[in-house]
Image (cartoon, grey):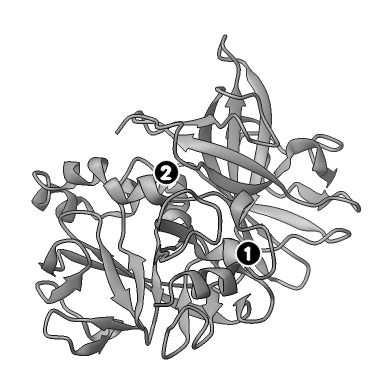
């Protein structure tokens, strides 16, 4: 898959290296570094006035990323490499993970280092570095990128029956919007703390004509067909990320505890029906590929390339059109007969 700069980029909430400094240890005073420079048992602290900023990235076909033109951080077009996954522990024995992203310039020199926390970081808190993982960093990053439904989500089968996602099996036939009945090729499952980038988005019953609540991963894209273009997208068919609809009321972040996530994979990227809402299935691209078991990837070697031609992605709209508290209500009215 080639980088497509015409599509919305992935926006990641990150901290530039200077905002996360060593307050005790071998690298005293230094900001966040990459794996070669890190020393286990160094203690880090987040700057008192720090808040995460967005680093917008496009996916490249070499497993790396490039900074998007609209990114608030970074130099547009610069290469970004995923370096490692760090594990920190607080004095209260809470464990926090952070992904290290390195921006490099045209000569291959480090331009900036960013920390992508997988749980909320708090100022005036000591974070002891207890783990540096290079091997599984891509897989951990992929887990963030994989769109997923929470346990209990009812999926429409080809028969019209509604089946809880945890009861689905590989081979089951699911109703898709564009290609009718399609067989599930793989079902992924993982349980994570519902914090930070893993905290699910709750779309309450009725918000988008859904009969029941729908709980999905933050970047899960929902398909909306507008009968009138009330959002100003210039087209009737839209893909909208769940996180961009959050209004603190009918659509909100449900943080706390743990969440069981399920990913559904088909031969192609599909739009299926979950609690009556049209929503995407897992898309395999350079960012999500490490989440797929090698055996499954080998078995699907002939069909996985079809994901690179996912035409649905042309319908995605960015946050700029949805940056208003009534966005979900506008879309609900726009899709009403």
Q: Of helix, strand and loop, which one carries label 2?
A: loop
Asked whether the residues under the numbered discs 2 and 1 touch, taking CB atoms below 8 Å apart as contact, a structural biologist would say no
Q: Is residue 38 visible?
A: no
In the depicted structure, whether residue 288 falls above or below residue 93: above
Query: Can you say which quadrant of the picture contains the C terminus?
Result: bottom left
Task: State the residue at coordinates (46%, 63%).
Answer: 228
Q: Nearer the viewer, mark 2 or mark 1?
A: 1
Check disc 2 and report the residue beneath it: 135
Q: Is residue 53 visible?
A: yes
In the image, is 332 to the left or to the right of 47? left
In the depicted structure, whether residue 252 falls above or below residue 70: below
- Give coordinates of residue 100: x percent, y percent: 60, 41
**Alpha-carbon distance for marks 2 and 1?**
22 Å
- Give coordinates of residue 276: x percent, y percent: 34, 81
Task: State the residue at coordinates (42%, 84%).
Answer: 210
In the depicted structure, whether residue 210 falls above or below residue 54: below
- Give coordinates of residue 177: x percent, y percent: 22, 66
Mark before the other along the chain sequence, 2 or 1: 2
| Circle 1 Cα neighbour tier, 10 Å, few/some/many (<14 / 14–19 / ≥20) | some
Q: Residue 226 occupies which quadrant of the picture?
A: bottom left
Q: Residue 165 occupies which quadrant of the picture?
A: bottom left
Q: Of helix, strand and loop, which one carries label 1?
A: helix
| Circle 2 Cα neighbour tier, 10 Å, few/some/many (<14 / 14–19 / ≥20) | few
In the image, is 69 to the left or to the right of 291? right
Q: How many marks?
A: 2
Check disc 1 and report the residue beneath it: 196
């Amino acid at each position: 898959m080639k980088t497509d700069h015409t599509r919305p980029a992935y926006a990641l909430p990150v901290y530039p290296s200077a905002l996360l400094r060593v307050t005790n240890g071998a690298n005293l005073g230094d900001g966040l570094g990459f794996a070669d420079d890190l020393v286990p048992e160094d203690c880090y602290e987040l700057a008192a006035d720090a808040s995460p900023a967005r680093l917008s990235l496009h996916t490249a076909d070499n497993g790396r990323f490039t900074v998007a033109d609209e990114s608030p951080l970074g130099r547009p077009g610069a290469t970004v490499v995923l370096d490692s996954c760090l594990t920190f522990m607080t004095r209260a024995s809470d464990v926090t993970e952070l992904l290290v992203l390195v921006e490099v310039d045209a000569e291959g020199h480090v331009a900036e280092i960013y920390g992508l926390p997988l749980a909320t970081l708090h100022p005036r808190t000591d974070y002891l570095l207890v783990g540096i993982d290079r091997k599984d960093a891509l897989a951990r990053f992929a887990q963030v990128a994989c769109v997923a439904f929470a346990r209990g989500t009812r999926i429409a089968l080809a028969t019209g029956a509604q089946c809880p996602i945890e009861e689905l099996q590989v081979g089951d036939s699911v109703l898709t919007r564009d290609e009718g009945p399609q067989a599930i090729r793989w079902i992924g499952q993982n349980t994570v703390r519902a914090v930070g980038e893993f905290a699910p988005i709750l779309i309450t019953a009725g918000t988008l004509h859904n009969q029941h609540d729908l709980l999905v991963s933050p970047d899960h894209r929902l398909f909306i067909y507008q009968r009138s273009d009330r959002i100003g997208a210039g087209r009737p068919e839209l893909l909208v990320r769940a996180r961009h609809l959050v209004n603190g009321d009918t659509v909100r972040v449900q943080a706390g505890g743990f969440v069981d996530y399920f990913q559904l994979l088909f031969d192609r990227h599909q739009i299926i029906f979950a609690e009556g809402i049209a929503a995407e299935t897992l898309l395999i691209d350079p960012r999500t590929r490490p989440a797929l078991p090698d055996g499954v990837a080998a078995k699907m070697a002939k069909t996985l390339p079809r994901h690179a031609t996912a035409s649905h992605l042309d319908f995605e709209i960015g946050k700029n059109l949805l940056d208003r508290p009534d966005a979900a209500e506008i879309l609900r009215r726009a899709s009403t007969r």
